[in-house]
Amino acid sequence: MSLFVVKHRHTPESCPAKDRISGTFLLSHLSQATASQFGVKIRATAVLDGQHILELIVDASDEILVERFMAPFAKLGNVDIIPANTCETVVLRAQC
């Protein structure tokens, strides 16, 4: 499994939290049960208050699996998928 940091940005106007149906759907989509159907394991999620940014830390065997999982969010704004590593891995290989 590879580690990825995912960042989703949307405008205040397209904020799914303002729409009960959209917000509920996206919240359920972020469940581990749904993520596992895409081959993704969610390690953590966070929304940056007032910034309309959602960040996730996930594991997946391939970036394309993360892209497919994040497709509903891509309809609302930008999705950036960034390959990452744990601090332990970086120290062991002596390189960021």
Image (tube, rainbow, N blue to C red):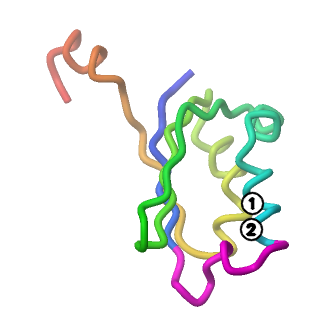
Q: CA distance from mark 2 to mark 1?
A: 5 Å
The C terminus, quarter of image: top left
Which amino acid type is shown beneath numbered disc 2? Answer: Gly
Q: Give the image location of residue 7, x and y in percent.
A: 47, 57
Which residue is at 57% across, 29% downward? 59
Which amino acid type is shown beneath numbered disc 1? Answer: Leu
Judged left or right of residue 46, residue 72 is right
Give the residue pinned by disc 1: 26
Is 27 colored magenta in this rendering? no
Total labels: the figure holds: 2
Q: Is residue 87 above or below residue 52?
A: above
Identify the secondary structure beneath mark 2.
helix
- In depth, the one of 3 and 53 nearer the eye is 53
Which residue is at 19% across, 15% downward? 91
- In depth, the one of 35 and 82 nearer the eye is 35
Give the residue pinned by disc 2: 23
Q: Is residue 80 above or below residue 9?
A: above
Judged left or right of residue 72, residue 46 is left
Q: Give the image location of residue 75, x and y in percent.
A: 69, 73
Q: Residues within 10 Å of mark 1 (few under 14, many from 20)?
A: some
Judged left or right of residue 34, residue 49 is left
Which residue is at 55% across, 35% downward? 58
- Say which quarter of the image contains residue 15: bottom right
Which residue is at 74% across, 68% downward? 23
Q: Is residue 78 above or below residue 63?
A: below
Asked if disc 2 and disc 1 are in contact, CB closer than 8 Å, the reply is: yes
Q: Which residues are magenta?
A: 10-21
Q: Give the image location of residue 14, x and y in percent.
A: 62, 84
